[in-house]
Image: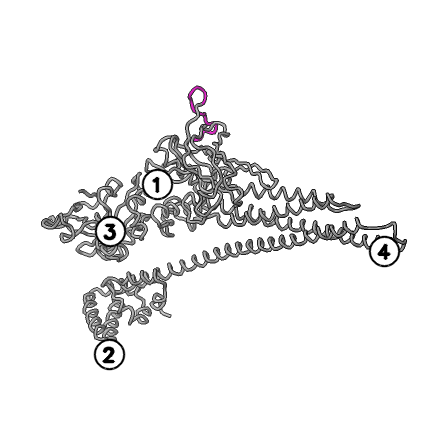
């Protein structure tokens, strides 16, 4: 199968990329289609360097065009194709003196096709892995559902067994109470006693069997409970951590709520069985009765497992966040925040019964202390949840500094900055139901409390670092000796930030550029690590700002001004200047790309383009970066549309023609232009004007 055939079998996204690739006139798609086998059979890379080989292939190409033209002339309904191929041949004649240029163009198109095929294959592999992962998760859920269903079925069987046991005991008791020994012969007495003994033996066996079944059920419940608490709930909590820093993961609690409710209901049913055995024991006992011996340890196991399940079912569903905050887990004194807790045991009898109290954890010595103000007690209820879950939604809480020692603030014994102090809020309620009394407690993830907006950037850095690396929510002293992040962890976290701000994560090429910037050239970056200090405390080389300050400036620029362009892939973003020049010098005149500035603290974006001198030598020109101050006045697409440079005789010319690799500028950005034509804009009906950017030196721009 030819490479061209493979391209035509791709799904819509990648076939559209192939279509866009051939959207210009440099190398017509119809020529590529009808001469596919011959084109792929030639060494165009060699021809681009060998003029004699290029001249030979040029002549053969023209002959193939003639042959294809002749074939069209013999077929019906090919008039337009005849006309097009005649025009294509005429257009190719311009390369008669420069056949190497045409060979280079064809070679470039073939390489771009391979890139599309490779990207499609990689996407398929990723999708396959995701499907496999989802399938594994789905299979895990199915197994839990099946085990819970089997568990419930066995409970129903035991309900029948306990009724039979009660009937069996009642029958024995009746026989025993109605036994008449005085008027019976010795033989009759022995016969009646023998019958009673058989009934007692059968009753004893039934009691032992039922107790054994309870023990077996508790073994199953132990395993199921461990699956829910130690695996599924732990996984959910880790997913919630990741979602707080931008990961696109599922944090819904519906499955867990359903499972916890089912197993806790079943455990309460086992507890009722043990209570029924107590009732039966009160009515009748005998020598070597198994109930007094075996029931207490079984009761202890039921209570222990029920307590563990119920305690684990009390979770923080929505972590603390401010309405207009940077993200969750960054709070500010005297500014309201909200947080929501949920009880995963959903039972209507407890609606509006459990009162939840919220308090702030001030236990870390040396950290600032706070008072929490607002409505501090709320009932778990089903009205505040979209799906009827048992929740308490604290919406209007506020932190206020707690004065220490004559008005001063706490002295941090750990030498940590304010934004490295981790705090949390605690929640408590008392569970009293069906004879079981349990104190329920849960805590939020650690958060940072700031006192002014200037601390928000470094506070968010702390939130990112903690939730990327630590799953222990009680580790408030994490930044006393926090671990370094691997490049895989750091790259994933950073990609989530761009996904949150611009609906598109970082691709492999962008991550590779960042890794090269941080670690230099390496065979691979698997063993490379980034310490906390390098991320947020040490300035980048030759700058007065840290890695995080630089990245956060770019993220803010993307979020506020460049979201659409980043989302549709128009911004290459991270690429070093050397690679930029290599890419552009291979392209046609006016090809440009957009990248982020490495020297602007608060985020800057620039564009570079290739132009050619009279003797054909390429040069790459770059404008001074545009910052938020520029983009708040005029949007970047309008800048690209109206940008001009001064050429001979002071004539302003727009040098930007194609977005890399070869997308016409207006095709890439036209939908974002805000300027309207005279017919569309009533203010320009009689006088057509526009604001343009004009520069004599590409290194600067002016309004």
Residue 349 showing in the rendered view = yes
Mark 1, residues whose alpha carbon is within 10 Å: few (<14), some, or many (≥20)? many
Residue located beneath label 1 in the image: 552
Question: Going from the N terminus, do you reach mark 2 or mark 4 first?
Answer: 2
The numbered mark at residue 191 is 4
Q: Secondary structure at mark 1?
A: helix
Check the image and name the residue furthest to the top: 406
Question: Going from the N terminus, do you reach mark 3 or mark 2 first?
Answer: 2
Residue located beneath label 2 in the image: 76
- Kindly identify the residue that appears in the image at 15 percent across and 50 percent down: 681
| 499 in the magenta segment | no
Q: Nearer the viewer, residue 254 or 119?
A: 254
- Kindly identify the residue that appears in the image at 30 percent across and 39 percent down: 602
Asked if residue 256 lies left or right of residue 61, the reply is: right
Distance from the alpha carbon under mark 1 to that under mark 3: 25 Å
Q: Nearer the viewer, residue 91 or 179?
A: 179
Residue 462 showing in the rendered view = no
Residue located beneath label 3 in the image: 672
Mark 3 and mark 4 residues within 8 Å of each other at the beta carbon: no
Q: Which residues are magenta?
A: 404-417
Indicate which label's residue lies in the foreground, 4 or 1: 4
């Amino acid at each position: 199968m030819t490479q061209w055939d493979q391209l035509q079998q791709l799904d819509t996204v990648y076939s559209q990329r192939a279509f866009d690739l051939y959207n210009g006139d440099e190398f017509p798609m119809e020529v590529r289609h009808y001469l596919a086998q011959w084109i792929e059979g030639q060494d165009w890379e060699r021809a681009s360097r060998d003029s004699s080989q290029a001249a030979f292939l040029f002549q053969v190409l023209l002959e193939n065009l003639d042959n294809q033209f002749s074939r069209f002339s013999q077929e019906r309904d090919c008039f337009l194709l005849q006309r097009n191929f005649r025009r294509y041949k005429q257009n190719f004649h311009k390369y008669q003196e420069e056949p190497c240029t045409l060979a280079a163009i064809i070679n470039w198109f073939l390489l771009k096709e391979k890139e599309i095929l490779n990207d499609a294959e990689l996407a398929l592999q990723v999708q396959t892995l995701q499907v496999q992962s989802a399938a594994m998760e789905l299979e895990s859920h199915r197994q839990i559902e099946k085990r819970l269903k089997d568990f419930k079925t066995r409970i129903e069987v035991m309900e029948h067994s306990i009724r039979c046991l009660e009937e069996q005991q009642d029958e024995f008791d009746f026989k025993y109470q109605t036994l008449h020994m005085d008027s019976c012969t010795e033989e009759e007495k022995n016969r009646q006693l023998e019958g009673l003994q058989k009934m007692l033996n059968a009753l004893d066996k039934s009691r032992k069997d039922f107790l054994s079944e309870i023990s077996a059920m508790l073994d199953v419940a132990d395993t199921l409970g461990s699956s829910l608490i130690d695996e599924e709930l732990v996984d959910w909590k880790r997913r919630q951590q990741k979602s707080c820093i931008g990961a696109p993961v599922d944090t819904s609690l519906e499955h867990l709520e359903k499972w916890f409710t089912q197993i806790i209901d079943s455990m309460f049913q086992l507890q009722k069985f043990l209570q029924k055995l107590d009732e039966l024991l009160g009515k009748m006992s005998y020598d070597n009765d198994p109930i007094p011996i075996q029931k207490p340890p079984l009761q202890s196991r039921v209570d222990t497992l029920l307590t563990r399940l119920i305690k684990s079912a009390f979770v923080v569903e929505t972590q603390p966040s401010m309405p207009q905050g940077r993200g969750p887990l960054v709070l500010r004194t005297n500014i309201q925040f909200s947080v929501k807790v949920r009880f995963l045991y959903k039972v209507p009898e407890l609606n509006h019964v459990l009162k939840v109290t919220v308090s702030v954890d001030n236990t870390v010595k040396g950290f600032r202390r706070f008072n929490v103000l607002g409505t501090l007690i709320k009932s778990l209820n089903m009205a505040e949840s979209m799906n009827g879950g048992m929740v308490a939604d604290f919406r209007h809480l506020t932190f206020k500094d707690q004065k220490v020692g004559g008005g001063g603030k706490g002295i941090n014994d750990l030498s940590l900055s304010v934004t490295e102090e981790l705090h949390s809020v605690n929640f408590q309620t008392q569970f009293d139901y069906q004879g079981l009394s349990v104190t329920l407690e849960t805590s939020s993830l650690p958060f940072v409390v700031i006192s002014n907006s200037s601390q928000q950037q470094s506070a968010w850095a702390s939130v990112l670092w903690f939730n990327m690396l630590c799953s222990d929510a009680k580790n408030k002293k994490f930044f006393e000796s926090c671990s370094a992040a691997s490049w895989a962890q750091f790259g994933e976290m950073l990609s989530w930030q761009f996904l949150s701000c611009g609906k598109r994560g970082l691709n492999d090429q962008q991550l590779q550029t960042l890794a090269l910037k941080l670690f230099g050239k390496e065979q691979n970056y698997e063993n490379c690590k980034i310490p906390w200090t390098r991320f947020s405390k040490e300035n980048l080389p030759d700058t007065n700002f840290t890695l995080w300050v630089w990245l956060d400036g770019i993220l803010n620029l993307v979020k506020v001004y460049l979201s659409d362009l980043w989302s549709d892939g128009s911004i290459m973003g991270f690429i070093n200047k050397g690679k930029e020049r290599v890419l552009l010098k291979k392209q046609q005149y006016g090809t440009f790309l957009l990248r982020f500035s490495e020297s602007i603290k608060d985020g800057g974006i620039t564009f570079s383009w290739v132009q050619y001198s009279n003797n054909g030598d390429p040069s790459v020109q770059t404008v001074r970066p545009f910052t938020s101050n520029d983009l708040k006045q005029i949007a970047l697409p309008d800048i690209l549309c109206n940008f001009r440079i001064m050429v001979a005789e002071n004539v302003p010319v727009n040098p930007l023609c194609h977005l890399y690799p070869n997308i016409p500028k207006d095709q890439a950005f036209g939908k974002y232009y805000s300027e309207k034509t005279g017919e569309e804009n009533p203010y320009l009906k009689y006088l057509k004007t526009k604001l343009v950017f004009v520069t004599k030196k590409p290194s600067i721009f002016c309004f």
